Amino acid sequence: MEASIEDYKSGDLDGATAVIERWVQWRSQTRDHFNDVPKQPKPTSTSLIRLAFPNEDPAAYKQLSRPAHGNAVWLTAVAIQEQKRTPFAAIYAMKNISFATRCLVTAISSAGELWSSDLNEITQRALAQFDIHTDWDQLAHKVSSQSRALSLLNEGEHADTRPVPQPPR
């Protein structure tokens, strides 16, 4: 919590500073109540994904991180595969988008449970403006089905790893 507070102090994002100040006050007033509470391990992105998606490949976060953080090896591999006109990058991107969408669906579902919200009603109202008629359950099922279909694709099978002669220098 304290590390997150330091992160948010750099800018007042929609009143974040006020929330931080109130939390610091609450914490200083209640500090003694937590003396016997064991310290909790600091979660990592990988551990949170593993908790939310126990059947997911443990490397899922790393796979999402490579394009997001501009991993040089990943960018080079994608550029080469694009030059060779293989579907490698498209499959990789679809799988990452699918996983990110499942993360979003899971987060929305958890928030709905936390706030006792009717996600079906919220979904129908939100999508009505686009003339899309579905409810939350159908939407979540479609995301799950699409994810399963994409999981059958292996982008590595479509990579062209043959050496290509380099032009003379």
Image (cartoon, helix red, strand yellow):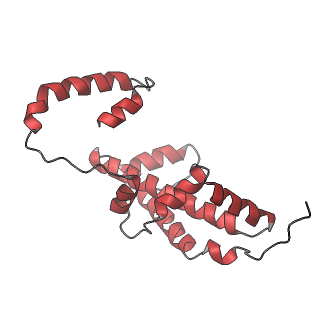
Q: Of 27 and 122, which appears nearest the observer?
A: 27
- The quadrant of the image that shows the N terminus is top left
Q: Does residue 139 appear in this view?
A: no
At a point 11% along the width and 38% down the height, the residue shown is: 34
Q: Does residue 125 appear in this view?
A: yes
Q: Which of the 4 image quarters holds residue 155?
A: bottom right
Task: Pinpoint residue 37: horizontal percent, then vertical percent.
Answer: 11, 45
At a point 47% along the width and 44% down the height, the residue shown is: 125
Q: Is residue 117 left or right of residue 124?
A: left
Q: Is residue 72 left or right of residue 51?
A: right
Q: Which of the 4 image quarters holds residue 149?
A: bottom right
Q: Of 115 and 120, which appears nearest the observer?
A: 115
At a point 12% along the width and 30% down the height, the residue shown is: 30
Q: Residue 31, relative to residue 110: is it above or below?
A: above
Task: Pinpoint residue 23: horizontal percent, then vertical percent.
Answer: 25, 28
Q: Of 139 and 12, which appears nearest the observer?
A: 12
At a point 50% along the width and 64% down the height, the residue shown is: 142
